[in-house]
Amino acid sequence: MPSQGLGSTLVIANPASHSGKGAAAAARVKRFFESYENATESFELVLTKEPLDAVRIASQASDRDTVIALGGDGVIHEVVNGLMAIEKERRPRLGIIPMGSGNDFARTLGMTFNNPDAALAELLGSSTRTIDLGLVSSDLTPEGPVPGSPGTYFMETLSFGIDAAIAIDTTRRRAEGTNTEGSALFLTSSIKVVAAGSAGYPCRAIIDGEEPLDLNTLVFTIQNGPTYGGGFRICPAATPNDGKLELCFNVKKPSVPRLLFLLALARLGRHTHSRVVRLRDARTVSVDFTERACPCQIDGEECLGNHFEMRIVPQALNVIVPATCQW
């Protein structure tokens, strides 16, 4: 077996992830660690039972060397927020066994997803790197899921507008047991949602303290990694260790057919040449929606508010990455 040990290890698993396949994956991981004692100094597996369970469990793991999140981006998001409640000097490193529909954070790290055996091999044979995180607070949710925290952390994506409404719809459909996954799920939700939000959401955005931008938002995405929605390369240049966030937002209002075409181009990152959108990096962003509330998602979960403050948190978390990681 690969040589890297994980030390004292806690696995937080969502048994409902990947249409219920997370339970079998958790059982497989448990058998593995019980069989290969040299992989860890100690090992515990905890299954989540309800939303925010993973936040609570991870926030109490300061005595661990490694906390592994088993599931989709939702449970990883919760584990990240739990770990960030621990003071940095005692904060365990994060590992992931991706078992989800989107798996965008796994794509950023270069991890194999929906294959627990391959993910285990990558965890044991790889290295640790430090990543940045995004942080958001709003007028309706000034604290994050841990009381007293400065907001909610995101490891991959935050967005406003139609794409956020799509992400919220895909999360709801997964919870309802849809068999559609990945980019197909994203595209079918896109067709459903786009018409309802095509009028746009007026807002004023301030990026890095510069002059305000008055926008009619259809898409406003803030990325710490390049993809969302199951592999759509909305911000192809985003890298989670460069001390900045990458933005993609519309500066013109396209027709519905053209908007759908741009979303299709985003699958391969080919939307970046369109004059409809602007891409740039930033360290701080504030957004005020001036006329009506705008859908907002953070790592696929709904976030409420009308005024939002976002910033980069550099070198926030140690994460296990495989040898194939490209950054």
Image (cartoon, helix red, strand yellow):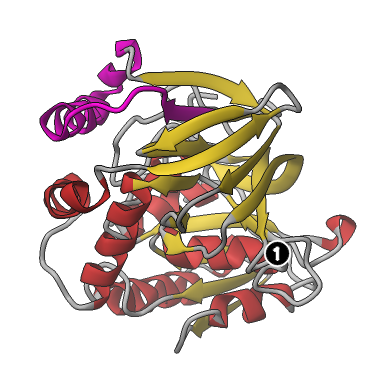
31 left or right of 197? right
Image x and y of residue 95, in percent: 56, 55
Range shown magenta: 246-274
Query: Any magenta on residue 271?
Result: yes
Q: Quadrant of residue 81?
A: bottom right
Is residue 22 visible to the viewer in this orientation of the structure? yes
In depth, the one of 325 and 166 nearer the eye is: 166
Give me the residue at 44% from left, 54% from top: 294
Give me the residue at 71% from left, 31% from top: 283
Is residue 106 visible to the viewer in this orientation of the structure? no
Q: Is residue 18 above or below residue 160?
A: below
Give me the residue at 56% from left, 76% from top: 54
Count of numbered badges drawn on the protein: 1
Q: Quadrant of residue 8?
A: bottom right
Give me the residue at 47% from left, 51% from top: 1
| Residue identifier under label 1 | 83
Image x and y of residue 321, in percent: 54, 41
Task: Give the residue type at disc 1.
Answer: Leu
Image x and y of residue 86, in percent: 80, 66
Q: Residues within 10 Å of mark 1 (few under 14, many from 20)?
A: many
252 left or right of 177? right
